[in-house]
Amino acid sequence: MLNLSLVIHNHQPVGNFDFVFATATERAYDPILGLLERHPAVRLSLHYTGPLWDWLLARRPDHVERLKALVARGQVELLTGAYYEPILVSIPDADKVGQVRKMTDFLRRTFGVEPTGMWLAERVWEPHLPKSLAEAGVRYTLLDDTPFKMAGLTDDDLFGPYVTEEQGHAVTVFGNVMYLRYAIPWHPVEEVMDWLRAQAAAHPGGVAVMGDDGEKFGLWPGTWDLCWGPEAWMDRFFAALEASADWLRIRPLGEVAAELPPLGRVYLPCASYEEMMDWALPPRDFAAMRRVRRELRESGRADILRFVRGGLWRGFIARYDEVNQMHKKGLWVSRKIHGRLEGEEKARALDHLWASQCNCAYWHGLFGGIYLFHVRAANYANLIAAESIADQASAGRERWVWTEHGDLDADGREEVVLNTDRQVLTFKPSYGGALVEWDWRAARYNLLTGMTRRREGYHEELLRAAEEGRLVLPGEPDRPDGVRVKETDIHTRLYHDWYRRAAFLDHFLHPETTLEGFFQVRYGEQGDFVNQPYRVQVKEDAAGLTLALTREGIVWAGEKAVPVQVEKRFVVTPGNDLLTVHYRLTGGARFIPRFGVEVNWGILGGGSDRAFLYILRGREKVRRWPTDIGEAGEVTGLTLGLPFPPLEGMEWRGPQGVPQVTLTLSAPAALWHFPLEAVSNSEAGYERVYQGTCTLLWWEVPLEPGRPWEVTLQVMLG
């Protein structure tokens, strides 16, 4: 007799669109409940994440009531987990324990159960986790079989639980069998049952565990027809399980954990599922790792393959500055909350903080991840809300202004933060004196939520398929070696930036540089300012804060290197939504460089027809779209609209219909603007995904010794 424990994990991220929640519920979550109701002998474990619970209770309470009935009759075991589905290894221990306890308390109140098993987000494991899990009341969890094999175990060793510990805090861990995860629901039912029968003969009394996403049962491309359509794979599979009761027991994982003694002690390395570890690698290594795995599988070298590992999940923090910025801001805010707040105020702030830790915007694989703009925006909305509660408590008054210094992003260099009751601006003096985060408290919005255009490991596949004529467009029939794309020429849209797209980056451009060349990153940078260090000086007085960032660099004029000093001063005041930026350029010789100031705006909904970009030329106002590529002369300002306030339940109460940003100039400039678009891969194919809008304002600057050139930019939020 073999035990089979099926675990289905249902998740939607914080900030996801309402229609996605609804579609997932209709095409995957509802059908699974219907399947269980039709097959009462099949008992399994379910896990729903906090954002999905919140949505279901508000929009689909009938689903929750049906689930209560299944739980009450013992057919479904509910697993706990960190409420907002963070990558647990990445957040402070107090937040780990707090998030798990929040979920456990919710399940106790709502369903009257006391869960002791948990679902670990993305199955990301590190050896220190057992201590926090045990402190949160977790007794067992399941991980992919990958780390077990990396620790020296084989497939035959995974038909039972193991115990692991940290500082004496023990947790039971089960291996999630890769064969079952890949076979269900894609292999023939008969083949899956034959495999289970073989394991029952080889491992009597043991357990085979399969845990995977509920969305693959109807929401993923092609799975609706497979699972619930004419093929009815899931009904046929559950019927086959019921018919196998003489040799197969289908049981929730918790029952098995309570009954089976551990097969032994194991210490597992840092790992996740195989695909995640490959995605975490740098692009060149990602492609190489896929080749290595393919070659080892084709040559039958599973004995070697089980020791081959990819990268760590933390590789995403190293690869994406935007992930690191958001992650380290979360740590910064967590320290503020735990160090400053108590009682109800702390609880409110923690709930926003924990929502901001939702994992989907902190990594990238086949499902969007960091490239899902609205998910990034929602995480920042909650971060800003949490920090505002902590800062308000520290200030003890309605209006304030102060400076914070520290290595906020943990790169070994100090950042400077200008903190007011209206705005929080984070500067990196070590990197071009750039503004890298610009939080607008009233809108709960980071104006710099955009993304740098990067090379991804899967771009190699796209380029190779294009070269070999294997691209498949929507509506065209699949082919075995085909690569699905949503545009014929998408492989020509791969532009990779050599610097981080931030705000108030200072350029000196070759006089022959064109908009097209700048957009495609094929141009001549004549200065050494964009990503180089600036000196810092902060002045604070009753009127507000002034941050002065200065660099003495060089600008090439033909074959001559001319010394140039750039000083930019940022001024903020309490109770004010205005940012004033003064530029002052001083040259060491007479010449006329082309000087530009780049700002990359994260415009939520920038790819929709509700976002806008107005170009101001005196009294003239020209409408453009954030996704347009264009240029204009004699520009005196810009207005940008952010159409979707990103926090659930929030209403914009400003004077305009949507949050707007207006920039005005003291001297007319030329403007280049274009969208930042990632070429991202998904199961539906390669597509361009809007990530922000770049604006470059530039001037032909007459410089000569002793005669500085100046310009002032004012940015009003409202």
Image (spheres, rainbow, N blue to C red):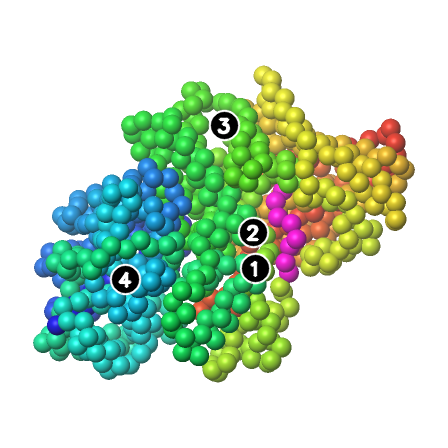
Residue where numbered disc 1 is placed: 678
Q: Position of residue 118 (x, y in %)?
A: 25, 52
Nearer-the-camera pick, 220 or 98: 98
Could you tell me which quadrant the C terminus lies in? top right
Residue where numbered disc 2 is placed: 451
Please tell me whether mark 2 or mark 4 is closer to you in this view.
4
Which residue lies most toward the right here?
Answer: 590
| Most frequent secondary structure within the magenta stretch | loop
Residue type, numbered disc 3: Asp
Please tell me whether mark 4 or mark 3 is closer to you in this view.
4
The magenta stretch is 495-504
Marks 1 and 2 in Cβ contact (< 8 Å):
yes
Q: Earlier in the sequence, mark 3 or mark 1?
A: 3
Q: Which mark is residue 429?
A: none
Indicate whether 405 appears above or below 641: above
Q: Earlier in the sequence, mark 2 or mark 3?
A: 3
- SS of the residue under disc 1: strand
Residue appearing at x 52%, y 39% in the figure? 409
Indicate whether 622 appears above or below 652: below
Residue where numbered disc 3 is placed: 421
Q: Earlier in the sequence, mark 4 or mark 3?
A: 4
Q: Earlier in the sequence, mark 1 or mark 2?
A: 2
Residue where numbered disc 4 is placed: 175
Indicate whether 88 appears above or below 142: above
